[in-house]
Amino acid sequence: MKIGLVLRDLHREERELARELLHTAERHKTSHDIHHLALDLADWSHRHIRELAELAERYDVTLDPEPDDEPGPVGRLREKGSEIIGRRGEAGRRGDAGLLLLRDLRRICQQASAVSVDWELVAQAAQATADDQLLDLAQRCHPDTLRQLRWANAELKETSPQVLTS
Amino acid sequence: MGRLDRIAEPWGTRTPYARGEKWPVRVDTFLADGNGAEHPDRWVRSASVLHSNGDALDIAVKDGRIVGVRGRAEDRVNHGRLDPKDLYGWQAGASPDRLTRPLVRRGGRLVETDWDTAMDHIVARTKELLRDQGPSAIGFYTTGQLFLEEYYTLSLIAHGGLGTNHLDGNTRLCTATAAEALKQSFACDGQPGSYTDIDHADVIALFGHNVAETQPVLWMRILDRLAGPEPPALICVDPRLTPVARAAAVHLAPRPGTNVALMNGLLHEIIGNGWTDAEYITRHTVGFDELERRVKEYPPERAAEICDVPAEEIRRAARALGTCERLVSTVLQGFYQSHQATAAAVQVNNLHLVRGMLGRPGCGVLQMNGQPTAQNTRECGADGDLPGFRNWADDAQVADLGRVWNVDPSRIPHYGPPTHAMKMFRYAEQGSLRMLWVTGTNPAVSLPELSRIRSVLSQERLFLIVQDLFPTETTELADVVLPAAGWAEKTGTFTNADRTVHLSEKAVDPPGRARPDLDIFLDYARRMDLRDKDGGPLVKWHDPESAFEAWKECSRGRPCDYTGLSYDRLRGGSGIQWPCDAEHPDGTERLYTGGAFWSDPDYCESYGRDLVTGAPVEPTEYRAMNPYGKAVIKSAGYLPPHEQPDGDHPFLLTTGRTLYHFHTRTKTARAPQLQAAAPEMWVEISTGDASELGVMEGDLVEVSTPRGSVRAKARVSGIRDGVLFLPFHYGYWDIDEGSEADEAHGRAANELTLTDWDAASKQPLYKTAAARLRRIRAQDGSPAPAPTTAASAPLGAGVPETRGGPAAESDEDVRGTPPTEGDT
């Protein structure tokens, strides 16, 4: 049985997604819609993380039920990158905040996609093992992930024409 | 013929009628005193523009001046009645401080100029920005008070000419949620119900809709039913003790921001008790199962706890809503400007869908609007949507619009949803929107968080054009000010909240060099040399009637079909409801008769949005719901508001309007009777909270939020505990020297409101800021300057009643039941 491995992966990716959402909220306080919604949507991931941790015990996997706000090594690298791009944006006059927003949204899209794929795997495994509880969890949480993804994607679609043409 | 002070008695004399009968005619007239006004030279056809009710009236003209107004007896909307704003508000037009010449900013000051200079300046700047950045640099912020022909022209210029996606109106503040809620449930905008449903209803439910003050003539209709045999029962949801609440069988006063929980509690009871129409649900809707599951989580006790209303009252309301045979529901700002706006308004649609109560006499939803011509911004696309309720996400529909306009569809921005107003101001703040053309609205007072808005509008890098009747707080900040002709000074059509189209004709000349908005837009298009794809002029019309004819073609075959209408037809009778086409030559009283909806994926206006995230539903997702011809039931759970009361800011602040004023009072403050009735800002506080804080009627108090503070006199009223109310009408242009609020911005309610909006409708929230209140001192012993006639009525004794006196005496002519069919 390798279900525990997938749960561990999923847990890590959800925490990463929650972190991206929180950091986006933090960085775009004056884009009020982004700020509020990113906070709201981070809560969804926090709920997923808690529920995952609870259920994972059955697979002998210990997962932290709390979100992790510290960026991991990959995250830190991205932070660094964001600073560089951010500065370049500034040097190139306007649009720095806009570019930063595009990049954050893009990262949320990618991260939510990763989470989505993992939920898919979990749901498949749950069906194969007739684990109703796990299947129920996946069926409740995966739609949230897709909504997080669609939100970030929609914001990108709406904002990018303005940022990229100005 | 009677004489009545209509300031003191805003709704006039009762003319009771029974269910199913015709509403009796009562003709209201107000003519100026003296100068032979009682014998006008002529009467000119129009309708009211100080609210969305669309009351038909005729304008009395004597010696080239307006001398009064009279309600039109034969019109389906008002049967002759007028509300106080219409009776007295017309006087503003002749006010000496109208804008009469264009102004341009030179050396930091606005100086008079001529039209050529002003327009060439605008054109030069537009061209420069198009060259430097492209259409994304240019935005238009319009209103709910222009005419259809003007919106349609503006929509073509912005979308088809310049190619910008940045076109919205202050309708975002008043009607966006109404439109979005209709799109969510029915996949298309369009008011399902009709005012005539009031004549048949046995329950009328008003959700966050103080109709007595926002649409007084519709309230007169309800009052006349209440006074007649077999009166309907009213259900009122409002945190204030409004006239509606006083007349209601059940009054629910929820904590602001909890409407979704309340609606879910009501639906819980209705579905749980089986008060649903199972056959209608199966045949005409999708999504019921999810709603059933969702509302199971909201037994009345849980809703009661969230909303702070008694569970038993929720049950009583649900029983009335669930067991009546003919239900009319109306919704307005108490839902639209509050937390989870669209989700809450959609639950009202759901109430009607699960009960199968649409499209029949007495069974209708009225998702209201605030402004007189807000409906037309939605139809013509001046709110950012595409004209004719076309779907921006459907390439075939965009191509069809390209055909109508003779432009390449790729020139019409449709790569994403239109930019909503709050976002446009954000782009301006960030510097990527560099020219903003404001028409007929005053964002420097009406938008939330005014200190932020002022800083956005006064930026050097933003080229601000303001087109209006009067100097306002916004014209003060402009680079170019264009003087516009107002109502009665130009011709055009507009459509009220129940789809009734009226023609409003020019009665008098505008003052000085002021010009109709339509002429200004046409002039701009000509100077910009905007072309269609064959090199012909983009805008092919030259006056109101030719614009209307062009609009008819654009609306052909669409839900809001105007092809059966013409200026001549509108002159021949009175108001007519769209759709009006060959099949329905006399218009259409109710939409969705027989449960046929405009939701086919290839026809619908919208695929909807996620109620929480606001993300547009993708076409494939929409098709997968299988909504062909069916309504979409969307459920939602309650979410706590983003800003909640705490120890520092223990109150919930809500804003709203009074019967006597419209918007930022640019017109109503210039009508002496209206201004005297509500001359100054006030704060409403409950008796319980007032006694706890030691606040007495008339004491000077300060209300603050993290964004600012306002000082005004306290009115101890019937508002629920824990909630403060401020009217939003008061800005700074007419403030007295040395008055208490004069010091650095302390009178406008929007100094306090927060920047947050509903994710689906993008309507800003004005009803849920956390606030604190501090008593400053007893003032001069006089009461707060709030009207005593309506929701701001004092609870204590000793406050003199609001009166208009002899200057407000109007004629009332009760003529009884109309001899002929007054309604279609």
Image (cartoon, helix red, strand yellow):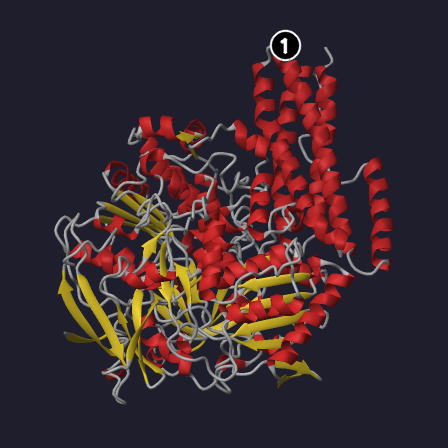
Q: Please name the amino acid that badge 1 sits on.
A: Thr
The residue most toward the bottom is B35
Across and down, in percent, residue B14 comes to 17, 63
Image spot of residue B187 (x, y percent):
47, 40
Q: Give the residue at x 30% y 71%.
A: B58
| Left-right relation of B793 to B639 | left
**B623 vs B338, nearest the viewer:** B623
Q: Residues within 10 Å of mark 1 (few under 14, many from 20)?
A: few
Position in image of residue B353 (x %, y %): 36, 36
Residue designated by label 1: A129
Q: Can you see residue B526?
A: yes
Q: Residue at x 51, y 68 (%)?
A: B518
Q: Which chain is indicated by disc 1?
A: A
Of the 4 image quadrants, the one containing the N terminus of chain B is: bottom left
Disc 1 element? loop
From this view, report whether residue A133 is shown above or below residue B383. above
State the residue in front, B757 or B534. B534
